[in-house]
Amino acid sequence: MPADTLACAHWEPPVACASCGACCREAFDAVPVEEGDPTPEHHPELVMGEPGAWREIRRVPSPTGCGTRCAALNGDGSVTSPFHCAIYAHRATACRELEPGSPNCHLARVRTNLSPPTHTSVAGPRSAH
Ligand code: SF4
Ligand code: SF4
């Protein structure tokens, strides 16, 4: 292929969670905790709600001043302080199912203005950085 061949305008390099963190911060308003998830047993201080009812992981105000983020998210996305989950081994099912590069990953990145929206994006940007 010639070097000057035009590529897809929506192409992106592989995502890097350490500098992104979108799905753990402003992209979503809540991280649900399901029955059987290990989070309540190992980190009860991070779980809001009662067994048998809606439960979610506690959130804290975002340092950006826009929305909230998961209380278990550490770091600021910089090289010296990458984003990382403080309860990774005991995170919720919703966290385990959201894989890098998946449609929900893309949605989170679109909502935080890290990726451009495409025709498959189901919602536009929600926060300005
Ligand atoms: S899974 Fe996707 S949205 Fe979540 S931190 Fe990684 S790259 Fe960002
Ligand atoms: S529990 Fe961990 S993986 Fe799940 S949203 Fe919070 S920081 Fe992200």
Image (cartoon, rainbow, N blue to C red):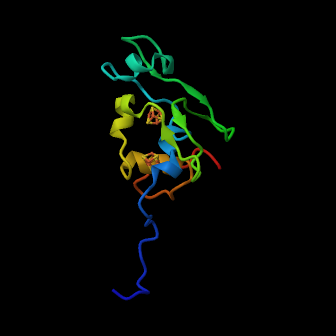
One can see residue 123 in this view? no
Q: Is residue 31 above or below residue 80?
A: above
**Nearest the camera: 82 or 21?**
82
Along the line of sight, which residue is nearer the eye, 6 or 51?
Answer: 51
| In the displayed structure image, the side of residue 5 where residue 69 appears, left or right | right
- For image coordinates 45% across by 30% down, the residue present is 31
Q: Position of residue 17 (x, y in %)?
A: 46, 49
Residue 49 screen position, x and y as percent: 47, 14
5 over 42 or under it: above or below: below
Q: Residue extending furthest left?
A: 36
Could you say which quadrant of the image residue 62 lies in? top right
Work out whether residue 85 or residue 24 is closer to the camera in this orientation and state it. Answer: 85
- Left or right of residue 33: residue 84: right
The residue at the point 30 percent across, 20 percent down is: 36
Residue, far front: 80
Instruction: Measuring from the top left, give residue 63's x and y in whole percent.
Output: 66, 38
Using the rendered image of the protein, determine whether residue 93 is visible from the camera's viewpoint: yes
Q: Please state the total of marks drawn on the protein image.
A: 0
In the picture, the quarter occupied by the N terminus is bottom left
Residue 85: % across, % down: 47, 36
Q: Is residue 97 left or right of residue 20?
A: left
